[in-house]
Image: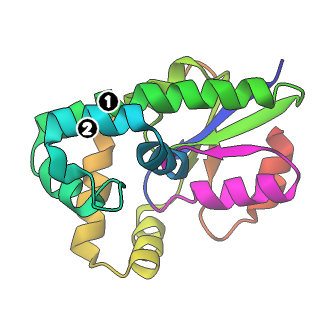
Amino acid sequence: MAKLIAITGGIGCGKSIISQILTTLGYEVYDCDTNAKLLMNQNQGIKNILKSHFGNNVISEQGEIDRKYLADIVFNNKEKLKKLDQIVHPFVIEDVLNWKNIHDKYSIIFIETAILYQSGLDKIVDEVWNVQSPLETQIMRVINRNNISRDEVISRIESQKHQIKHHTNTRTIINDGVKPILPIILSIL
């Protein structure tokens, strides 16, 4: 049975870099954000539930989720965002479990997620790698990657602070952009 490890951390901490390194090393990594978007566009059950809660305009003429329309609704309303999460997270958890069954022949597999605890994925993982970076490093990474203002980055970082919890089996990876990350990963595998 494969050991399932979650890679998590705040925006700009370097979760994706860790995932890319693990993939290069031959490990299987499930990207929750990417797969959630795919599920939302491909799963008719999700689309039907979203339409019933957010209206028919949530689905574009092409039959895909209108992300801008949905974002305008949920990111200005905490209750609607919570409802969206309640709709999507169970589908993602089910997909992760199916993916895990397919990859059960491996000794270790990984999922990458920014919302480990909010999604409930923490309940199905065996271990958590919590990726952390100095605040200034996070800010500069996100500014460079997303081309947004310093204030916007700080606002996003602040909004994630309440999300930090701890799994009973957690390892911390400091990704400061100075110390090489590969030796750190190899030491905890």
Please identify the quadrant where the N terminus is shown. top right
Circle 2 or circle 1, nearest the eye: 2
Q: Nearer the viewer, residue 61 or 14?
A: 61
Q: Which residues are magenta?
A: 12-33
Q: Nearer the viewer, residue 112 or 83?
A: 83
Can I make out residue 152 in this image?
A: yes
Residue 97 image point, x, y percent: 63, 24
Name the residue tied to disc 2.
50
Q: Position of residue 146 (x, y in %)?
A: 40, 76
SS at mark 2 in the image: helix
Image side of residue 43 versus residue 101, left or right:
left
Q: Amino acid at mark 1?
A: Ile
Q: Amino acid at mark 2?
A: Leu
Q: Which residue sits at x=21%, y=39%?
A: 51
**Colouring scheme, one of rainbow, by chain, secondary structure, one colour:** rainbow
Left or right: residue 119 compared with residue 48: right
Mark closest to the chain's N terminus, 2 or 1: 2
In the displayed structure, 57 sits above or below 154; it is: above
Identify the residue at image location x=26%, y=79%.
149
Does residue 165 lie above or below 29 as drawn? above
Residue 36 magenta: no
* Residue marked by disc 1: 87
Q: Secondary structure at mark 1?
A: helix
Looking at the rendering, which quadrant does residue 128 occupy? Answer: top right
Q: Residues within 10 Å of mark 2 (few under 14, many from 20)?
A: many
Separation (CA) of disc 2 from disc 1: 8 Å
What is the x, y in percent for residue 23?
Answer: 79, 54
